Image: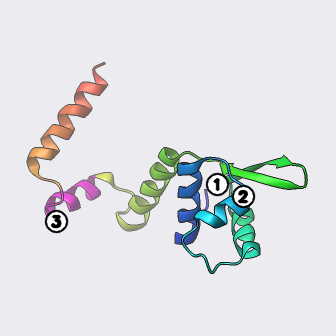
Amino acid sequence: MKKLTPKEEEILSLFWEKGPMFVKELKELYSDQKLHYNTLSTMVRAMEEKGFIAHEKFGNTYRYFAAVTKEDYSKQSLGNVVKKYFNNSYKSVVSALVEEENLSVEDLRKLISEIENSKNK
């Protein structure tokens, strides 16, 4: 799956939050009100080419919707970060979180327990 720009991620978030929309509706919700309708439409079509957005035809226009779930996108994004910055090692990620004190040892123990319990079910 290709990467999205921050603006594209914002657009995708709007589709997750609001559901299927026409570009006109998206423009009303989009934070950058200065962005021209045609530019936003081009961005949505580019996202469709990347596989993140899909459409259904309504007369002469299209209604767009998210083609990936938020959960799938999050997993893919996390995988990219782990690959790019942690040499594809999730152990290194957890180690960095503990070292930076973003994750306490107690939280780590709870996490390990939750993982063990979910595997035993």
User: Dots 1 and 2: beta carbons under 8 Å?
Assistant: yes
Q: Main secondary structure of the magenta part?
A: helix
Kindly identify the residue that appears in the image at 30 percent across and 25 percent down: 119
Q: Secondary structure at mark 1?
A: loop
Q: Return the residue at label 1.
A: 52
Q: Position of residue 63 (x, y in %)?
A: 75, 51
Disc 2 residue crowd, few under 14, some 14–19, many 20+, Cα 10 Å: some
- Residue located farthest toward the top when viewing the structure as drawn: 121
Magenta run includes residue 97: yes
| 82 horizontally vs 114: left or right | right
Q: Return the residue at label 3.
A: 100
Q: CA distance from mark 2 to mark 3?
A: 38 Å
| 64 horizontally vs 121: left or right | right
Asked whether 51 or 89 is in front, the reply is 51
Magenta run includes residue 94: yes
Q: CA distance from mark 1 to mark 2?
A: 6 Å
- Residue located farthest toward the bottom when viewing the structure as drawn: 34
Q: Position of residue 69 (x, y in %)?
A: 55, 45
Disc 1 residue crowd, few under 14, some 14–19, many 20+, Cα 10 Å: many
Q: Which of the two discs, 2 and 3, sits closer to the camera?
A: 2
Which region shows up in magenta? Answer: 91-102
Asked whether 47 or 80 is in front, the reply is 47
Kindly identify the residue that appears in the image at 18 percent across and 32 percent down: 113
Q: Is residue 49 above or below residue 20?
A: below
Q: CA distance from mark 3 to mark 1?
A: 33 Å
Q: Position of residue 90 (x, y in %)?
A: 32, 52
- The image quarter in which residue 103 lies: bottom left
Q: Return the residue at label 2.
A: 48
Q: Is residue 116 above or below residue 83?
A: above
Sequence order check: which comes first, mark 3 or mark 1?
Answer: 1
